[in-house]
């Protein structure tokens, strides 16, 4: 495993985002990206991967776009007006069996869509970190073991709420126990610098987007590079 993974989320979100991510790969700014299976730019991103040696995982998506499995459109916790819309509280500890089964069906379908299109998936993360919500985490962990994939850990910086900090530690400990944690540390792009301690494996998350003559991280506003 690489000691440092700089991962661009949202590959496949749109052709414009794909352009920014491909440029970051070509300039050596990132060494990994995670690809969405159900967004307008997904097929375009798949074609770019086929023509390159990009290291690509899957960015599981329950937040927006068209689901691969139309059954989700019957669950108001997961959809609205024919599109994905995530209505599950972040602190949920339980979901009804039918909702759990629909989530598992959709997430597995997204994994298989990429695999069937020739993508050698390196690892799993998710749009807006929904895979860290407890009942969804259990589904993702099951799929990770089934397909022999590592999973992005909860962010190891940021929120200082003691309950959330404890929850992240418990989740991380369980991920270590079942050997699916991608890295030991996970931070945002604005927290990364050359002095970061790489005694432990580290993932850095970035969201590239082209703005004028610059590529910025659209979640932090930081300039990544100039075009």
Image: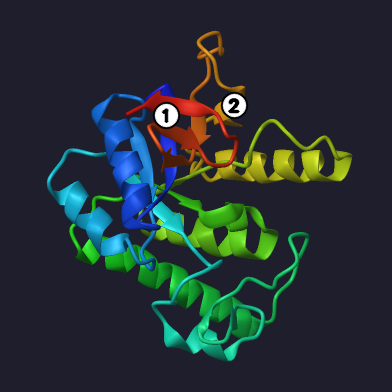
Circle on res. 108? none
Q: Quadrant of residue 113?
A: bottom left
Relative to 152, 121 lies left or right = left
Residue 40: image location, x then y, percent: 35, 66
User: Which of the two residues, 200 or 206, is positioned nearer the viewer here?
Assistant: 206
When the figure is inspected, residue 31 is found, relative to residue 62, above or below; the finding is above
Residue at x 67% of width, y 58% of height: 133
The crowd level at tag 2 (other Cα within 10 Å; few <14, some 14-19, many 20+) is: some
Residue at x 63% of width, y 53% of height: 132
Distance in Å between CA atoms under marks 2 and 1: 15 Å
Residue 14: image location, x then y, percent: 36, 58
Residue at x 69% of width, y 81% of height: 96
Q: Sequence-wise, which precedes: disc 2 or disc 1?
A: 1
Residue 167: image location, x then y, percent: 76, 46
Residue topped by disc 1: 5
Relative to 90, 11 lies left or right = left
Residue 188: image location, x then y, percent: 58, 32
Element type at mark 2: helix
Count of marks, rendered view: 2
Residue 51 visible? The answer is yes
The crowd level at tag 1 (other Cα within 10 Å; few <14, some 14-19, many 20+) is: some
Q: Residue furthest right?
A: 162
Callout in the foreground (2, 1): 2
Residue at x 18% of width, y 58% of height: 118
Q: Residue furthest left?
A: 51
User: Which of the two residues, 210 or 120, is positioned nearer the viewer here?
Assistant: 210
Which quadrant, please, contains the C terminus?
top left
Element type at mark 1: strand
Residue topped by disc 2: 190
Which quadrant, please, contains the N terminus?
top left
């Amino acid at each position: 495993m690489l000691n440092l993974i700089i991962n661009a989320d949202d590959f496949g979100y749109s052709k414009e985002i794909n352009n920014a991510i491909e440029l970051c790969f070509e300039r050596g700014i990132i060494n990994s990206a995670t690809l969405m299976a159900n967004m307008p730019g997904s097929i375009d991103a798949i074609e770019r991967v086929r023509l390159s040696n990009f290291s690509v995982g899957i960015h599981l998506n329950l937040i927006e776009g068209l689901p691969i499995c139309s059954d989700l459109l019957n669950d108001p916790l997961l959809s609205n007006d024919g599109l994905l819309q995530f209505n599950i509280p972040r602190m949920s500890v339980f979901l009804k069996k039918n909702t759990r089964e629909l989530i598992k069906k959709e997430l597995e379908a997204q994994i298989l869509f990429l695999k069937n299109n020739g993508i050698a998936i390196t690892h799993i993360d998710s749009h807006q970190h929904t895979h860290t919500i407890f009942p969804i985490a259990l589904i993702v962990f099951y799929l990770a073991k089934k397909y022999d994939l590592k999973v992005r850990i909860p962010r190891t910086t940021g929120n200082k709420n003691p309950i959330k900090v404890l929850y992240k530690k418990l989740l991380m400990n369980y991920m270590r126990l079942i050997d699916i944690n991608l890295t030991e540390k996970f931070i945002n792009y604005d927290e990364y610098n050359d002095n970061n301690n790489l005694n432990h494996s580290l993932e850095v998350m970035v969201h590239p987007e082209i703005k004028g003559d610059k590529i910025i991280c659209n979640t932090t506003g930081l300039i990544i590079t100039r075009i």
